[in-house]
Image (cartoon, rainbow, N blue to C red):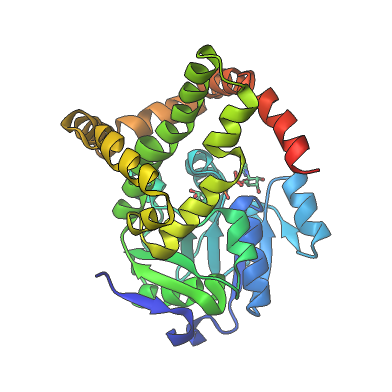
Amino acid sequence: MVPTYSSESVDKSILKGKTFSVIGFGNQGRSQALNLRDSGCRLLIGNIEDDYAKQAEDEGFTVLSIREAVQRADIILVLIPDEVQPIVFERDISGALRAGQVVDFASGYNIHFGLIHPPTNVDVIMVAPKMIGAAVRTRFNRLSIPNLIAVNQNSSGHAKEYALALSAMIGGSKGISFDSSFKDEAELDLFSEHAIDGPSLLGLVSAFDVLVQAGFSPELIILELYQSGEIVEVWKSAVEKGLLHQLEGHSTTSQYGQLTRGKSATSEQVKQEYRRLLTAIHDGSFVREWTQEMQANYPRLTELKKEAYSHPINETEKQLRAILNH
Ligand code: NAI
């Protein structure tokens, strides 16, 4: 088991009196800024002039340009999208850094894949919540927020203490930190998106197509597949009771069906596909593809989202949501 640290057991005094600049006020930026403010930290927001900056001002934060926010901080949290970080880091952050500052990332992506090279006189740490941004806020001081922490550069000799203390302040009283590395965070995160999240989403769409063709009612299909909310309860139960032990909450007919038909997902062919996806992450080919996509202004992502949002499943969902939210 990797070492873990509950927020309450961590010495946070190393952050006393420090100024924090949160760069970006999106999914993670807003939630982490609000949590840090509630944890008693002095905070600035560094943001380009956009709606996120306005929202930060509306919520009472001082918003500066990214460069100025970096200059005025001791601890800098880089919370803008991974694919734009290298450009912004090069343009607005790197030259504004001075010796002794701490730069924190919420993902191992850019450091592990060598897309950002911070100067050697700063600490480089990671506090990566294994939680979507909105929930980092809603769970604060109520439910656990697991953060992966790591150190990439230990210029001060205290980088791990900074990472632990920052993670504890972001996670609140129920936060828990796990020792990790930039590599493990980046590669596991991408693998879970490529091997599990994507195929699960698009697998449901394929099932919808097949069942519509077979003559079933579209509303009843998505009610059965996910829209009833049962799927949320099942995954909640998986988290609470165990992935496989949650089966006890299903009928024996369901248990038998799942364990026999589900075997197809354990075939050597599927594992081969998982290994292929992992190789494309590990050797950097996915990262190169995504960087090129960003540099070309997202043509493939735009096309794929257009295709996804025009699929008939969206209209059926809308009708069903109206009925379920009566
Ligand atoms: P986001 O997409 O919500 O970021 C929006 C922010 O980025 C805004 O403040 C916007 O002004 C700024 N921004 C966008 N484009 C910009 C540009 N070209 N130049 C300067 N600023 C720009 O980002 P999100 O999802 O919060 O991700 C931030 C970091 O957190 C990433 O490293 C991500 O991997 C990590 N992370 C995200 C999670 C999530 O739930 N979204 C979960 C765990 C980690």
223 vs 107, left or right, is right
Closer to us: 4 or 258 = 258
Residue 36 place in picture, x, y as percent: 62, 71
The image quadrant where one finds the N terminus is: bottom left
Residue drawn where x is 79% and y is 62% of the image: 59
Closer to us: 3 or 70 = 3
Q: Is residue 8 above or below residue 265?
A: below
| Quarter residue 286 falls in | top left
Residue drawn where x is 24% and y is 31% of the image: 270
Furthest residue toward left? 268
Residue drawn where x is 44% and y is 25% of the image: 292
Closer to us: 309 or 18 = 309
| Quarter residue 29 falls in | bottom right
The image quadrant where one finds the C terminus is: top right
Closer to us: 64 or 164 = 164
Residue drawn where x is 73% and y is 41% of the image: 324
| Quarter residue 19 falls in | bottom right
Residue 188 place in picture, x, y as percent: 33, 48
184 vs 271, left or right, is right
Residue 239 place in picture, x, y as percent: 43, 60
